[in-house]
Image (tube, rainbow, N blue to C red):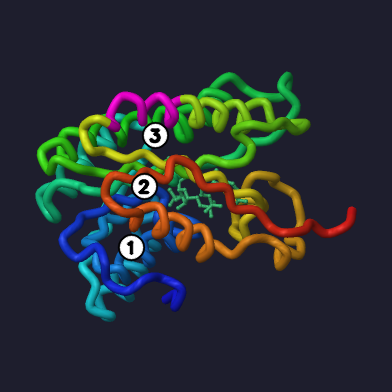
């Protein structure tokens, strides 16, 4: 539980959070629940989601854990249906689920390259498409897309991941133009290096290394809450959060 989260401000709101089983998504889900939202957690690892659900419910929060594979539209549809039944229309959607596959371009198998886009880009589109009708019924909403500073930069071995985040940037900026006149806010969140398992899982064979210089996941959650708590009529359209300094190579 993060003490940095503002007092209960989201009492009448339902929030869907993708990729909530660990890392940044879990931190955002906890912060939203602490702020009083009814939070629906989605990810593939239902056991991990249920642990978070249990802990938050014990603390008095309203939380639902549902299996979700954002790479599959059918799975997203099932999630949206069940989430709406349990918690009503979503006022907030956090598209956080993401993977990173890093290798030289000719070493990618086509299905891996496609998977990078299915999770990071198509998943963001699927969930936005499914959340928007509920937000329109509510007359207001907020979509938060967790992208990356990789969405506007480049790095060796980053063709798939960086390109997928460039796509998330473009999608998010255009989405805001589609929905802003309907009272729906859209925020692009761009973390730099964050202290999660992402780095280990993205580079198989890489040894665990010191990540203490990286931004804690709770700080990304704090930035998301800041954007969500902006006054009505104001849209925080982009937030960058990066470590102040990096370790010397
Ligand atoms: N860590 C960083 O330095 C960093 C920097 C910039 C941006 N980001 C972005 O932040 C987001 C979260 O990353 P993280 O650092 O928290 O990584 P993480 O610890 O690896 O967590 C990734 C989350 O995404 C979920 N996920 C992956 N594939 C999924 C799928 N097909 N369907 C549903 N959920 C899926 C995972 O859950 P399951 O495995 O249970 O499905 C997990 O909850 C990502 O979009 C990432 O690109 C991270």
- Taking depth in this image into account, of 102 and 147 the one nearest to the observer is 147
**Helix, strand or loop at mark 3:** helix
Q: Residue at x 42, y 50 (%)?
A: 19
Q: Is residue 174 above or below residue 233?
A: above
Label the magenta part by its dominant secondary structure.
helix
Q: In the picture, which quadrant includes the N terminus?
A: bottom left
Q: Earlier in the sequence, mark 1 or mark 2?
A: 1
**Helix, strand or loop at mark 2:** strand
Where does residue 5 sit, x and y in percent of width and height? 41, 70
Q: How many marks?
A: 3
Residue wearing tag 2: 94
Residue wearing tag 3: 124
Q: Is residue 114 left or right of residue 123?
A: right
- Taking depth in this image into account, of 152 and 181 the one nearest to the observer is 181
Dot 1, crowdedness within 10 Å: few (<14), some or many (≥20)? many
- Residue at the farthest right position: 249
Magenta highlight on residue 177: yes
Magenta highlight on residue 133: no
Q: How far apart are the alpha carbons under marks 1 and 3?
A: 19 Å
Q: Residue at x 28, y 50 (%)?
A: 16
Q: Quadrant of residue 32?
A: bottom left
Dot 3, crowdedness within 10 Å: few (<14), some or many (≥20)? many
Q: How far apart are the alpha carbons under marks 1 and 2?
A: 10 Å
**Helix, strand or loop at mark 1:** helix
Q: Residue at x 52, y 25 (%)?
A: 167
Instruction: Write down the region rendered in magenta.
Output: 171-180
Q: How far apart are the alpha carbons under marks 3 and 2?
A: 9 Å
Q: Is residue 160 above or below residue 99?
A: above
Where does residue 189 sit, x and y in percent of width and height? 49, 45
Dot 2, crowdedness within 10 Å: few (<14), some or many (≥20)? many
């Amino acid at each position: 539980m993060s003490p940095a989260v503002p007092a209960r401000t989201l009492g009448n709101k339902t929030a869907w959070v993708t990729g909530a089983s660990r890392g940044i998504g879990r931190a955002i889900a906890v912060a939203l629940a602490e702020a009083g939202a009814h939070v629906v957690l989605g990810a593939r690892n239902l056991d991990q989601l249920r642990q978070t659900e249990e802990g938050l419910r014990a603390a008095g929060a309203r939380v639902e854990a549902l299996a979700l594979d954002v790479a599959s539209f059918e799975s997203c549809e099932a999630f949206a249906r069940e989430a709406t039944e349990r918690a009503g229309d979503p006022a907030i959607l956090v598209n956080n689920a993401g993977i990173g596959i890093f290798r030289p371009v000719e070493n990618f198998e086509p299905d891996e390259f496609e998977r990078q886009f299915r999770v990071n880009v198509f998943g963001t589109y699927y969930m936005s498409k499914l959340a928007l009708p509920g937000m329109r019924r509510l007359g207001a909403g907020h979509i938060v897309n967790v992208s990356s500073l990789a969405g506007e930069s480049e790095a060796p071995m980053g063709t798939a991941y960086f390109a997928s985040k460039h796509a998330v940037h473009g999608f998010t900026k255009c989405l805001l133009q589609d929905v802003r006149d309907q009272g729906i806010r859209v925020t692009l969140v761009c973390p730099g290096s964050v202290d999660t398992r992402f780095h280990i899982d993205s580079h198989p064979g890489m040894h665990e290394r010191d990540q203490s210089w990286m931004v804690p996941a709770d700080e990304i959650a704090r930035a998301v809450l800041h954007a969500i708590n902006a006054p009505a009529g104001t849209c925080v359209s982009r937030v960058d959060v990066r470590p102040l300094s990096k370790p010397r190579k």
